[in-house]
Image (tube, grey):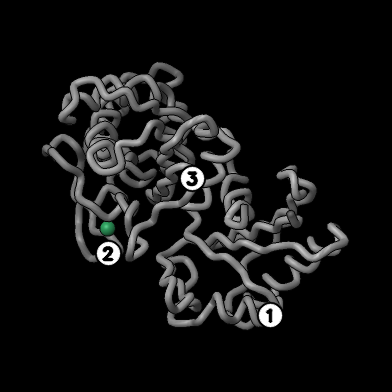
Amino acid sequence: MSHLIGLDIGGTKIAGGLLSPQGAMLSQRQVPTPKDYADFLDVCRDMALALEREAGTQARVGVGIAGRIDRERGCVSSANLSFLTGKPLLHDLEAKLGRNIRLANDANCAALAEATDGAGASCTSVLGLIMGTGVGAGFVYQGKIMDGFNGVASEIGHLPLPHREEPDGPLAPCSCNQQGCIDKTISGGGLARLYEAMTGKAADAKQIAALSNGGDADALRVLDRFYDVVAKAMVVILHTFDPEIIVVSGGLNALPGLYDEVPKRWGRYCCVAQPKTKFVPARLGATAGLWGAAWLWR
Ligand SMILES: [Zn+2]
């Protein structure tokens, strides 16, 4: 077993980590994400080689990245990094580093990490859900990412919210050219839109959480509705993957009451009155993507 390197490619930063063959995190680095493709490839190579020097031996490299991955062509379509469009990223990274590399969607990497070392470590089926700027998900069954034939199996963010009613908030247009997607409904922006629709005031998700912690009646009323909306979205997951556990990461994962309120409500919208699925916060935090990228080789 070799040392493992995980690179987590984000819109603003690239995080890298070196794991021992036993899976201990030995070192982490971070650099700003470059603005063009040639620099991007160089920065990825330099970070992997710098981590490898610390290991003192050749390591296996896994890369997690936001966006849809075309596995046949090794291309990524990313809303964050438009310079990647149409580029044979996997091929070019492998040429830069002179070895095979594994590449996966970042939400799938985070799910894999939580299923391996995090909140879902004892579970057979784990759905990793990111609720932040956007909504991403990854499904891991018996330790393997199950992303489907086209790589879209867990893209629940681009399905419409089921059982939507008018008080669930405005229908916002989405990057996928539809409107009312789950991505635009249970994300930070979705919560802010609901707050504005219900109160006529502007606040972001962090402010709404702080207001509700202080007992603000408006914020509590908005979160009460929001948890109903999240419960409706979770029914998409229950009726497709039906996982043993849903592990939530991203900026909204610390909303007060989230883990109690959503499971109280999802039975109303599900074929099963009391789904047994656990609904819990992620354990690995912001480093989950990095662990998962390295675990692509385990
Ligand atoms: Zn969409």
- Which residue is at the front of the view, 251 or 296? 296
Residue of label 3: 111
Residue, x 46% and y 42% (percent of image)? Answer: 142
Q: Which amino acid does label 2 sit on?
A: Cys
Q: How crowded is mark 1: few (under 14 residues within 10 Å), some or many (20 or more)?
A: some
Residue 78: percent from the left, percent from the top? 44, 68
Choose the circle earlier in sequence order: 3 or 1.
Answer: 1
Instruction: Examine the rendered structure and indicate whether residue 38 appears above or below residue 258.
Output: below
Q: Which amino acid does label 3 sit on?
A: Ala
Residue 21: percent from the left, percent from the top? 75, 49
Tag 1's secondary structure? helix
Between the C-alphas of marks 3 and 2, the distance is 23 Å
Residue of label 1: 96
Q: In which quarter of the image is ligand 1?
A: bottom left
Q: How many marks?
A: 3
Residue of label 2: 176
Between the C-alphas of marks 1 and 2, the distance is 32 Å
Residue 2, by quadrant, is: bottom right
